[in-house]
């Protein structure tokens, strides 16, 4: 352990000497601010080298987040991707345990000049929830679901849809969302969120009331309802503006029953597929808003 600590300190020292450090201010976290402050650009490190190393060491030893590199045995199990054809290799994976852990991971990334990606469910087809050579904030431990009243619920970002439905449906409530159980609520909401009930209730992000948000300086905004921020996050905020640790949603009444019909067509060629699509569009445009319809192409014919 002594040898490990000495090696880590040596690495941190070399990073600082190479000019990767920026000034970090650790203090009280603002709550319910109307507008986040502008991102502070990297600045020259202050204090002597040992003081700067101590600051980084304190972040690395935090109880709120655990950092994994390729040498750690758990790294591979955390670096999983939905699209097996795209493989990325982040330098560090930050497994956060709470919103303070997210804040500390963001500050550590700024200090180390590492680009940041955020992973909740990891279903990004293009693997935007990871990167090469940067830091990935892994949200998979944030599983809290809290009812605020009979219709409003606070859901942490690491919750996947099967976990959310298991909580909401017994209470007769739904959140208009997707149908794939392993999709994370974080990426779905911040990407818009389309599903079976979108025609009646809109997208998942349309049900969003507030967020707990960590900006690029590591500042935490508790349950903020800032209109500009929510406008940006509703469909366009997948890690572009900061990190969301929890969402507050308005839920809808679940239907009493749910029926489905599946029609299959075989031996299609391009002309037949085009004709079938034309008929499908002609009919589905007249469906009531309670109905959902999808045209799915499977196989290699087209």
Image: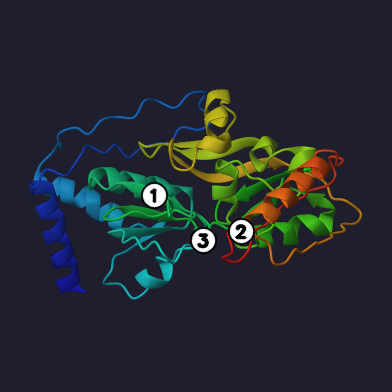
Q: CA distance from mark 3 to mark 1?
A: 16 Å
Q: Nearer the viewer, mark 2 or mark 3?
A: 2
Residue located 80% across and 41% down the image:
282
The residue tagged 3 is 141
Q: Is residue 164 above or below residue 21?
A: below
**For the residues bearing labels 3 and 1, Cβ distance under 8 angstroms:** no
Tag 3 secondary structure: loop
In the drawing, what numbered circle is on residue 160? 2
> Quick one: quadrant of the C terminus?
bottom right
- Residue drawn at x 35%, y 37% is 27
The residue located at (36%, 63%) in the rendering is 87
Is residue 222 visible to us here?
Answer: no
Determine whether 51 is above or below 36 in the image: below
Residue at disc 1, secondary structure: strand
Q: Earlier in the sequence, mark 3 or mark 1?
A: 1
Q: Number of callouts in the render? A: 3
Secondary element at tag 2: loop
Residue situated in front as seen by the camera: 192 or 293: 293
Up the image or down, 296 lies above or below 277; here it is below
Q: CA distance from mark 2 to mark 3?
A: 11 Å
Which of marks 1 and 2 precedes in the sequence?
1
Residue 65 placement, left or right of 285: left
Look at mark 1 in the image and give the residue it sits on: 117
């Amino acid at each position: 352990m002594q040898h490990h600590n000495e090696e880590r300190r040596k690495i941190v020292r070399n990073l600082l000497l190479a000019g990767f450090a920026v000034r970090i201010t650790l203090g009280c976290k603002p709550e319910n601010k109307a507008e986040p402050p502008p991102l502070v650009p990297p600045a020259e490190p202050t204090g002597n080298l040992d003081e700067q190393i101590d600051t980084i060491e304190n972040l690395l030893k935090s109880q709120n987040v655990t950092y994994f590199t390729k040498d750690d045995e758990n790294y591979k199990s955390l670096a999983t991707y939905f699209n097996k054809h795209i493989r990325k290799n982040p330098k560090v994976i930050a497994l956060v345990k709470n919103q303070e852990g997210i804040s500390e991971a963001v500050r550590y990334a700024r200090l180390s000049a590492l680009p940041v990606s955020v992973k909740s469910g990891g279903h990004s087809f293009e693997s935007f929830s990871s990167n090469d050579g940067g830091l990935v904030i892994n949200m998979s431990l944030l599983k809290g679901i809290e009812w605020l009243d009979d219709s409003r619920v606070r859901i942490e970002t690491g919750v996947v849809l099967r976990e959310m439905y298991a909580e909401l449906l017994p209470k007769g409530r739904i959140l208009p969302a997707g149908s794939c159980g392993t999709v994370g609520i974080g990426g779905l909401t911040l990407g818009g969120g389309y599903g079976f009930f979108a025609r009646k209730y809109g997208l998942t992000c349309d049900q969003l009331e507030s967020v707990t948000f960590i900006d690029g300086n590591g500042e935490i905004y508790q349950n903020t309802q800032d209109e500009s921020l929510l406008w940006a996050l509703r469909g366009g905020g997948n890690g572009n503006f900061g990190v969301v640790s929890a969402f507050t949603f308005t839920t809808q009444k679940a239907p009493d029953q749910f029926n489905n019909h599946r029609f299959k067509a075989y031996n299609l060629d391009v002309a037949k597929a085009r004709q079938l699509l034309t008929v499908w569009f002609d009919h589905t445009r007249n469906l009531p808003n309670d109905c959902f319809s999808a045209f799915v192409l499977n196989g290699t014919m087209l």
